[in-house]
Image (tube, rainbow, N blue to C red):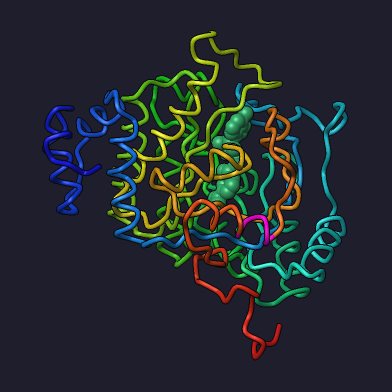
Amino acid sequence: MLDAAYYADLGLSSIHEKVLDGRRLSFDDGLALFDCPDITAVGALALHARCRLHGRKAFYVVNRQINYTNVCVNGCVFCAFRRDAANEPGAFVLSREDILARLKNADQSSLRLDELHIVGGCHPGLRLEWFEDVLRAVRAVNPTLPIKAFTPVEIEHFARLEGISSLEVLQRLKAAGLTMLPGGGAEIFDEELRPQLCPHKADAAAWLRISGEAHGLGIKTNCTMLFGHLENAAQRVDHLCRLRDQQDKSGGFTCFIPLPFLTENSRLKLPDERLGPQRGLDQLRTVAVSRLLLDNIPHIKAYWIMLGPKLAQTALWYGADDLDGTIVEEHIGHMAGAQSSQGLTINELESMISESGFEPVRRNAIFETLPPDGRNSAEVR
Ligand code: V47
């Protein structure tokens, strides 16, 4: 598959050489990979890069997602999850007790969590103290559970509400028990497109700055790209290169998650030629190009909720090395028409991986690997 003559025929000789030598690809290389007619040739290069990093390992996490509210001041046109105000039909705000009940339900069951993923809309009335209180309460229930919470967009929102800096917000949340930030809200950085999609959201510079601030405090973060909407290949490559530049500077991105835009219940309507089965191939290609361009970000996640389990499995052959996790409850993708179930069991995740020809490895939020049955018995929780 990695035959030099074949890549020469495709006009990809120099990319082929760079990938085999482990050298950095350029912006134009990224464009050429999006342009290449043979998606399996792109996938084979990504598989090579992925196996150099992780061999045949494919990771999963025993986690619980909690969306604390869908009330959001941002009004992004793609989002099917948000509600404008707390009295709008379908709007919800969880109480601290609701959050703890959900946590206990999962963590004190046979699941025993290795990640709690908390994320929500930018609510106009929830103050930073409330979030600190939630984190401390989670810590009181489980002192060692890694808490992945609040995207850079939420951090910026908290800073605006409190009239303090994003750095101070991060310091306070870290002191209250935050482990790491999820990667949401990056959407697409391009300065022309971003205002059309999410005019009120933290801009690209703020999103990247806050990620860098978190890294400076020793807080790992993830990063994402929302794709398959109005953007073109150059805007995708630009987005990936900006993440790579930020990672060169601050080094704390753990995982990149390409998020395919799901169209149901969205105010953003796509032309017919952007819809249909060809989107699956585009999604695989985007996973592959991400693996190849993001040479300094260790993990690429095939998020089964948004891709669907079948495509997520295939994506393991196109450069992804992680499926995310058990999830239990998910709203953002499901409000937008995700056909996947709400959660998967550990057995289902492990068989998805092994039946795809990879070796399942259980991990926690920060990608520390764990024995298949979770914690060492010596560990007191
Ligand atoms: O920020 C919103 C995206 C994100 C839609 O860090 C949509 O480990 C598709 O970031 N179609 C939230 N996507 C999810 C997210 C995430 C998920 C799992 C793991 C991690 C991690 C992060 O979902 C939002 C936005 O970019 N989104 N609406 C939609 N209609």
Quadrant position of ligand 1:
top right
Query: What x and y, as percent, mark residue 45?
Result: 27, 44
Query: What x and y, as percent, mark residue 82?
Result: 72, 31
Segment colored magenta: 346-350
Question: Is residue 299 at least partly visible in the picture?
Answer: yes
Q: Nearer the viewer, residue 297 or 345?
A: 345
Residue at image location 55% in from the left, 13% down from the top: 270
Quadrant into which the C terminus falls: bottom right
How many marks overall? 0
Query: What x and y, as percent, mark residue 21?
Result: 15, 53
Looking at the picture, does residue 362 appear above or below residue 68? below
Quadrant into which the N terminus falls: top left
Taken as a whole, is the magenta stretch helix, strand or loop? helix
Quarter of the image holding residue 31? top left
Asked whether 277 falls inside the magenta stretch, the response is no
Quarter of the image holding residue 308? top right
Q: Is residue 171 left or right of residue 176?
A: left
Query: What x and y, as percent, mark residue 344?
Result: 70, 52
Q: Is residue 31 left or right of residue 17?
A: right
